[in-house]
Image (cartoon, rainbow, N blue to C red):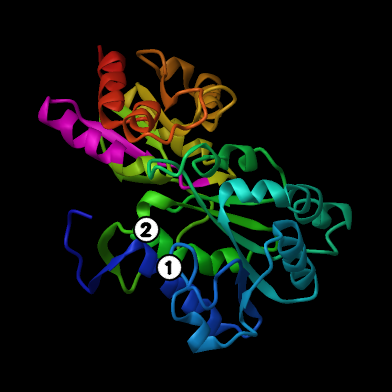
């Protein structure tokens, strides 16, 4: 964050997420965390480091290597009044629990006529750019945003990492939180007095008048950097962070396009059938006559993400790609 705020403290995305977990565990004895290596190891990405020593093995539970089993256990605990937080190491492993998420967690409230809420939070790391090769570099948030019955969050800022968890735990529906792996080391100021974020609304991270850069998650820093570069060229770019992927805040998208009359949608997922395609379709449905140029999309190449660093970077949306798309939109 560029502006200094009164009462702000320097922290990292990882530490903000850890403090959110600590607060949830302290404030409600029904809350517990479980997943692979979340206890003694401190989490594969260090988010839960120290929580086992503070809260004990009953509330920080290491699980066997079976995503279907421990996500299913989380669903059962939620049905019985607990508030489980389940950590899936990386998004690709969530596919092993897709039956539990799609056929059980997302449907039970509806199929029971509102009698069986599933207040379950599932956290997972997503995204590429860290040379983890094709099997550990997926961006599948758009897949999950397709499913009715769940809420899908993509915190991209320190404040959202800190404050999205508490309201997520009060939701009667399952909530999936996608944490982009490139953000864990990001540092910035956290407003210690910040209220809980709105889990229904997108956020304008930078106002502008010439073109809307619409994105979420790990692509937000790239969009902001692109906006800075465009400003040096006299192009005033607005940056809209979707942050809530289901329900998608179509009103915020339409309002941004109404201000700028041009849109670039940045999505680290593959282009075909992507969340970027959904946002573009909504702009066409709701804001067609506001547009002064066709909607531009900047997405990953339609290949399994390469391991080699140069190839990986070439496959992913980069600042130069966003700037070029903005230039095409502005003309």
- Name the image quarter holding residue 226: top left
Q: Can I make out residue 83 in this image?
A: yes
Residue at (35% x, 42% y) in the render = 220
Q: Is residue 199 left or right of residue 226?
A: right
Residue at (10% x, 30% y) in the render = 232
Front-most of residues 17 and 280? 17
Q: Is residue 85 above or below residue 204?
A: below
- For label 2, count other residues whose C-alpha is less than 10 Å away and answer few (under 14), some (14-19) or many (20+): many
Measured as percent of width and height from the top left, residue 158 is found at: 34, 60
The furthest residue to the front: 308
Q: Is residue 191 above or below residue 249?
A: below
Which element carries disc 2, helix, strand or loop?
Answer: loop
Residue at (66% x, 37% y) in the render = 146
Question: To which residue does mark 2 refer?
Answer: 184
Mark 1 vs mark 2: which is more N-terminal? Answer: 1
Q: Is residue 199 rendered magenta in the image? A: no
Question: To which residue does mark 1 refer?
Answer: 46
Q: Can I make out residue 118 in this image?
A: no
Q: Which region shows up in magenta?
A: 222-244
- For label 1, count other residues whose C-alpha is less than 10 Å away and answer few (under 14), some (14-19) or many (20+): some
Q: Is residue 187 left or right of residue 121?
A: left
């Amino acid at each position: 964050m560029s502006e200094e705020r009164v009462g702000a403290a320097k922290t990292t995305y990882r530490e903000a997420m850890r403090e959110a977990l600590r607060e949830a565990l302290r404030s409600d004895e029904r809350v517990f965390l479980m997943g692979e290596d979340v206890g003694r190891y401190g989490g594969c990405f260090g988010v839960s480091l120290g929580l086992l020593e503070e809260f004990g093995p009953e509330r920080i539970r290491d699980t066997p290597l079976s995503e279907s089993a421990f996500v299913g256990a989380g669903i059962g605990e939620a049905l019985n009044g607990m508030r489980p937080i389940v950590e899936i190491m990386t998004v690709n492993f969530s596919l092993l629990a897709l039956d539990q998420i799609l056929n059980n967690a997302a449907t039970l409230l509806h199929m029971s006529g509102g009698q069986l809420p599933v207040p379950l939070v599932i956290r997972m790391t997503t995204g590429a750019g860290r040379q983890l090769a094709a099997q550990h570099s997926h961006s599948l948030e758009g897949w999950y945003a397709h499913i009715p019955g769940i809420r899908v969050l993509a915190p991209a800022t320190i404040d959202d990492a800190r404050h999205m968890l508490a309201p997520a735990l009060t939701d009667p529906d399952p909530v999936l939180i996608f944490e982009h792996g490139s953000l864990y080391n990001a540092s910035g100021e956290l407003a210690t007095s910040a209220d809980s974020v709105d889990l229904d609304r997108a956020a304008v991270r930078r106002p502008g008048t010439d073109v809307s850069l619409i994105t979420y998650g790990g692509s937000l820093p790239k969009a902001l950097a692109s906006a800075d570069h465009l400003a040096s060229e006299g192009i005033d770019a607005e940056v809209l962070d979707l942050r809530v992927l289901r329900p998608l805040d179509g009103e915020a998208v339409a309002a941004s396009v109404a201000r700028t009359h041009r849109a670039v949608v940045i999505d680290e997922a593959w282009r075909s059938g992507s969340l970027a395609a959904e946002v573009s379709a909504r702009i066409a449905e709701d804001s067609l006559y506001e547009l002064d140029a066709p909607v531009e999309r900047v997405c990953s190449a339609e290949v399994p993400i390469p391991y080699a660093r140069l190839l990986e970077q070439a496959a992913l949306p980069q600042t130069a790609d966003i700037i070029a798309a903005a230039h095409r939109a502005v003309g």
